[in-house]
Image: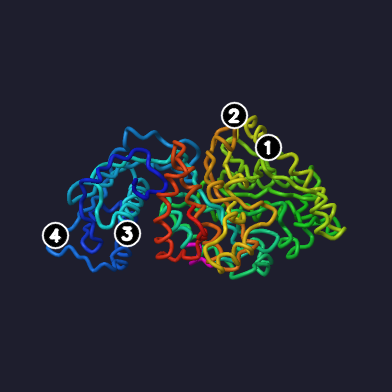
Amino acid sequence: MRPALVPWPHTVTLNDATTTLLDPAHVVIQAEESLHDARAWLQGEIARLAAARTDGHRADGAPPLRIVLLIGQAPRDVPPASGIAPEQAAPDERHTVTIAAGEVTVTGPCPRAILRGAATLVQLAECSAGRLPVGRIADGPGLAWRGLMLDVVRHPFHVDEIRRVVDLLTRYKLNVLHLHLTDSDGWRLQSAARPGLDATSPGELITRRDLDELSAFAETRGVTIVPEIDLPGHSLAATRAYPHLTDGGAAAHLGYVDPALPGAQAFIEETVTEFAHASRARFVHIGGDEPFGMPFEAYMRAVGAAVHAAHHAGSRVVAWQEAVRAGALRPGDIVQLWIGAETRIDADAKKAELPESAHPFVDQMVALFALAPSDGPAAARAGLSVLLSSSDVLYLDRPYAEAASDAEGEARRARLGFRDYPPKTIREMFDWTPQSLVAGLDVRIAGVEAAIWSETITSFDDLAFLLLPRLPAAAERAWARERTDWKDYRARLQPHAEVWQATGWGGAFRPATAM
């Protein structure tokens, strides 16, 4: 059986017949000062493994395993990543893990590469029963942007909970946490520019200091935080705080900021600038999705104002795919393709669920989604890279098709997930490649980003239930260049459920039968 590594590395040459002892209580880590963060993370993980030992085995008298973290060359047999990195200076994450008798060496050209190799070593230690196979792993990502979008508005996750999400991303070598911080339900990021927004938050505000500290913590874990301000649609919270931003009679189901009204364009420019200055990445996300009921000319003007403000503040822009229709994005910006090819809206059925007053909203929704197939080609013509977040396989707030293993899981399965999305199996959420999502399009892929929306989430365990075991599949697809096999992947993933239980992710979905 192959080691339980997820994502699967580029090159694995291990000899199961020859092993070296890894007793978590007897490990010495050597690293230069520039590798402080990687060393600290690895020490914490080794300490966790030592604390979890229940077999009573100790290697008293045996020499400790020496782990050497070393800046060096990237492995020549691993190609560089393609796509666009979120950081100001893109790190080379390629690395080599060499296991010999009594010693493990992790080598790479920068601290981020060493951290990725350390994550491989931790997974090996977790599944090796104390014995590491001798040999070499040479690895590096296929795509430079590998992320998760987390909606922290509809369910106001605490900062400590967001840190736990960051740690999960580190485990699976994901490198972006995209925080959806504003929506019709509230405005989570405290605003100095528009303090009236603070009262709209559904939970405790995330202050600028919170975001700075969270971003700094994430960087020590190899993760870049990209904040999102969602404008001009999804803006009921903003228009409740500042009613002059919209014509109340014309505002649609989700609300929008009308840049033609006095002070509205200034609102867009000031708040986008605030978000751009709050981002430690080279990108800020400006939203742009679902401007239902908004005249197209007003939408163009609003998106143009948001893009200009972000660029003026020194940031590149990521925007949901509808924004490409405004013609304001420039080379270096990214279009996030989220509307899956399977998206279908039954207008009659939807209207039957809603009062007659909402029927125009349904018609607007149908009309805007009908334009989605043209967004990818428009991005290609404009020379824009695309970030793949297809709702078909990367929206993790989709109901599970499999039955859960117990009654509590079945109750969660019935409650969680956006009901407009048909349930899918874990295998269906694995069975794709980045290239398959843009088949027939001549576009440059920036990366892959899964998304988790929080309309149905009421607790951290609910989040765990929707994220796991599906997030590792997105990580594998974003990392591995070759398409991996479902049967092999399933076998590698199964031991991870025990680790989720031990690391605070015990709410993960457990299917009634083997995946």
- Label 1 with label 2: CB-CB less than 8 Å: no
Q: Which residues are magenta?
A: 158-163
Q: Amino acid at mark 1?
A: Asp
Q: Element at badge 4?
A: loop
Q: Amino acid at mark 4?
A: Ala
**Which of 297/192 is in front?**
297
Task: Name the residue tied to disc 2.
Answer: 442
Labels 4 and 2: the sequence-earlier one: 4
Q: Element at badge 3?
A: helix
**Which of 68/366 is in front?**
366
Task: Name the residue tied to disc 1.
Answer: 375
- On screen, residue 381 versus residue 445, left or right, reads right
Task: Name the residue tied to disc 3.
Answer: 40
Query: Is 118 rendered above or below residue 484?
Result: below
At which x and y percent is residue 279? 53, 53
Task: Name the residue tied to disc 4.
Answer: 62
- Label 1 with label 3: CB-CB less than 8 Å: no
